Amino acid sequence: QVQLVESGGGSVQAGGSLRLSCVASGYIHSGACMGWFRQAPGMEREGVGYIYTGGNNAYYADSVKGRFTISQDNAKNTLYLQLNSLKPEDTAMYYCAAEPLPAGATGWSWFDPGTFCLTQWRERVYTYWGQGTRVTVSS
């Protein structure tokens, strides 16, 4: 069983910055897709970005590209989301999520973790979700 715990949310003024953390406990044997999502009141949950635990490149939604940065420290089982140049429309509950790769997938010649993670992120298909951390941006 994997548990995800987010932290780092808070209230900031527009233009400010925050760094969110997501600590994962439990064992993922085959690597995982790690995603960040957010949900504003009365709105659907939307993807912010994602990264594959075995890679270095992150993918971002257009609405946050150039302002948000995803990073990871696998030794600490921690995923980060750096939020810069925050806008009032970034106000939301932010969630991290984890979807383990299929068992043995990294040994399949045809398997592309990047494509798998993109699909999972677009479809919001993640097995494990954190409880969320709230970000409020005032104008």
Image (cartoon, helix red, strand yellow):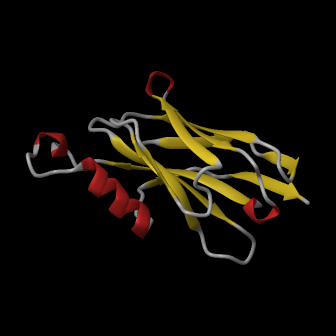
* Farthest top residue in view: 75
| Residue drawn at (45%, 21%) of the image | 75
Q: How many numbered circles does the render carry? A: 0
Tell me if residue 66 comes above or below residue 44 in the rendering.
Answer: above
Q: Nearer the viewer, residue 67 or 81?
A: 67
Q: Residue at x 86, y 49 (%)?
A: 11
In the displayed structure image, the side of residue 41 where residue 69 appears, left or right: left
Displayed quadrant of residue 120: bottom left
Vertical order, 47 against 49 (above or below): below
Tell me what residue is drawn at x 58 percent, y 43 percent: 69
Q: Residue furthest bottom?
A: 42
Q: Is residue 131 above or below residue 7?
A: below
Direction left: furthest residue? 109
Q: Position of residue 2 (x, y in %)?
A: 45, 42
* Horizontal and vertical percent position of residue 122: 42, 66
Q: Position of residue 137 (x, y in %)?
A: 84, 56
Picture quarter with the N terminus: top left
Quadrant location of the C terminus?
bottom right
